[in-house]
Image: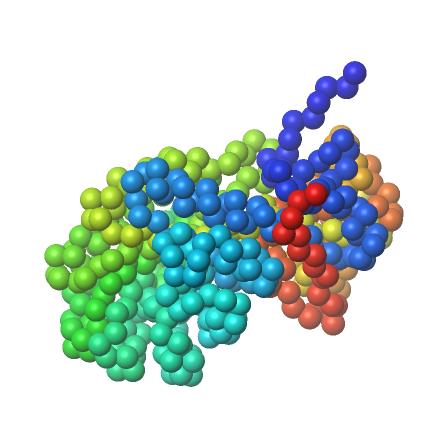
């Protein structure tokens, strides 16, 4: 008898291999591709709600007062928002809100049942035209530059406002330094030496600084937690400094950046360890602790299905061509996130080949990966990219006039 195959790191109740066949929300992935065509995103929406509850519960176990929000840029489907909306009554402490970063996202959130008090707006380089849309809604705004604080103060004197801070520290899985808050100057956040100026600007416009916001992580798993811990130390110091100046803080928002396992050897983030770090840094302040991940809430919910249209040897390299390109899934190209793919009907088959996985966009860099361990695949088979529930579907472009992928959302598991 053949030994049982260890589960893939990305498997869970809603996306798993049954026998040899990949299933999503209990449905056979290949059958869905044959019925609806490819490329096709398929989502197990229940897992988004499960991830949100796991975050909220971990923060609660650490003695913190949680505020969980979905980063809307990661997943904006009405089907997903409806499930999150159903977790708790609108405006209640257990409700899952959203983090938005553009006027379009803000209006989309309101159109899909979110109320203003559940929406956090954290944009960058916000224009007067942006504020024309934002201000009438009454949502809470976090600003990330002194000049932006001046602009917001001129337009909204007397309102509460959050400060997005830059602690000059951060951690991004797969990168040497954070693009948001590293040692080099970035376009995000107010530095520690500018806090007094920020407080003076707020006083001049009668703004009440009620939130500390940071974004200093991306895709972190357990290995990155020590660096994450260290990066939060200056954030706690800056929080204390703002409190000492009389700022009426009610929330520390630590942003997103929590990862999910994808490749062999990776394991799920220890949420109790993560929440414990937050409690050590911020528990003494008695503030709400906000978190607004995108990847963590949505990655595991989705797979992208594509058909193999080419298998060809080229100068000793095996190219496997698909009927999908980076216009439909550009997450790996923008963020450098690796991919893991299986043949939907033979998801446990041994990976004995080494291939280049290529898309159908007429650009030389439309390659999902080189030197990838893979199965001996044939034309016409359906390949599934795992853990593509976040970002990918929402970042589609019409380059080469290739259409966007279809999408199916299942809110119940069979």
Most extreme residue toward the right is 379
* Residue 133 visible in this rendered orientation of the protein: yes
Q: On screen, 3 above or below 192? A: above
Q: Is residue 123 left or right of residue 267?
A: left
The image shows residue 396, relative to residue 410, as above or below, that is: below
Residue 129 versus residue 184: which sits nearer the camera?
129
The residue at the point 58 percent across, 48 percent down is 46
- Give the residue furthest to the front: 89
Kindly tell me whether residue 315 is visible in this rendering: no
Q: How is the image coloured?
A: rainbow
**Residue 385, placed above or below residue 136:** above
Say which quadrant the C terminus sits in: top right
Residue 165 appears in which quarter of the rendering?
bottom left
Residue 25 placed where, x, y %? 67, 45
Residue in the image at 65% along x and 48% along y: 412
Q: Nearer the viewer, residue 356 or 233?
A: 233
Q: Is residue 41 left or right of residue 94?
A: right
Who's the residue at 21% across and 69% down the image? 208
365 or 238: nearer the viewer: 238
> Residue 372 or 323: which is nearer the viewer?
323
As drawn, which residue projects farthest toward the top?
A: 1
For the image shown, how many numbered marks are present on the structure? Answer: 0
Residue at image position (71%, 36%) is: 17
Query: Percent x, y for residue 269?
Result: 47, 37
Q: Looking at the picture, how far across and down is residue 109, in whole percent? A: 49, 68
The quadrant of the image that shows the N terminus is top right
């Amino acid at each position: 008898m053949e030994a049982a195959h260890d589960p893939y790191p990305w498997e869970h109740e809603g996306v798993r291999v049954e026998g040899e066949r990949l299933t999503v929300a209990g449905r056979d992935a290949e059958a869905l591709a044959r019925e609806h065509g490819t490329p096709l995103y398929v989502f197990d929406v229940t897992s988004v709600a499960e991830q949100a509850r796991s975050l909220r519960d971990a923060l609660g176990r650490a003695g913190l007062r949680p505020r969980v929000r979905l980063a809307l840029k990661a997943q904006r489907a009405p089907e997903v928002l409806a499930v999150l909306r159903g977790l708790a009554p609108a405006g209640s402490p257990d409700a899952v809100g959203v983090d938005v970063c553009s006027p379009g996202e803000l209006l989309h959130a309101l159109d899909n049942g979110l109320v203003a008090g559940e929406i956090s707006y954290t944009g960058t380089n916000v224009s007067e035209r942006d504020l024309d849309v934002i201000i009438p809604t009454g949502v809470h705004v976090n600003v990330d530059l002194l000049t932006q604080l001046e602009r917001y103060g001129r337009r909204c004197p007397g309102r509460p406002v959050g400060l997005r801070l830059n602690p000059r520290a951060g951690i991004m899985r797969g990168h040497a330094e954070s693009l948001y808050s590293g040692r080099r100057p970035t376009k995000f956040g107010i530095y520690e030496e500018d806090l007094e100026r920020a407080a003076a600007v707020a006083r001049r416009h009668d703004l009440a600084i009620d939130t500390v916001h940071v974004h200093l992580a991306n895709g972190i798993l357990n290995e990155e937690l020590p660096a994450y811990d260290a990066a939060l130390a200056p954030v706690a110091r800056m929080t204390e400094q703002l409190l000492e100046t009389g700022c009426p803080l009610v929330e520390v928002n630590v942003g997103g950046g929590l990862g999910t396992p994808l490749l062999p050897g990776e394991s799920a983030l220890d949420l109790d360890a993560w929440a414990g770090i937050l409690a050590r840094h911020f528990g003494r302040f008695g503030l709400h602790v906000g978190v607004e991940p995108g990847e963590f809430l949505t990655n595991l919910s989705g797979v992208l299905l594509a058909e193999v249209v080419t298998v060809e040897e080229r100068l000793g390299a095996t190219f496997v061509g698909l009927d999908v390109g980076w216009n439909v899934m550009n997450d790996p190209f923008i963020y450098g996130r690796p991919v893991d793919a299986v043949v939907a009907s033979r998801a446990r088959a041994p990976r004995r080949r080494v291939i280049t996985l290529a898309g159908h966009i007429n650009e030389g860099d439309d390659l999902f990966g080189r030197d990838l361990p893979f199965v001996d695949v044939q034309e016409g088979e359906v390949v599934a990219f795992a853990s593509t529930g976040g970002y990918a579907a929402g970042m589609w472009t019409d380059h080469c006039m290739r259409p966007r992928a279809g999408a199916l959302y299942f809110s119940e598991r069979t």
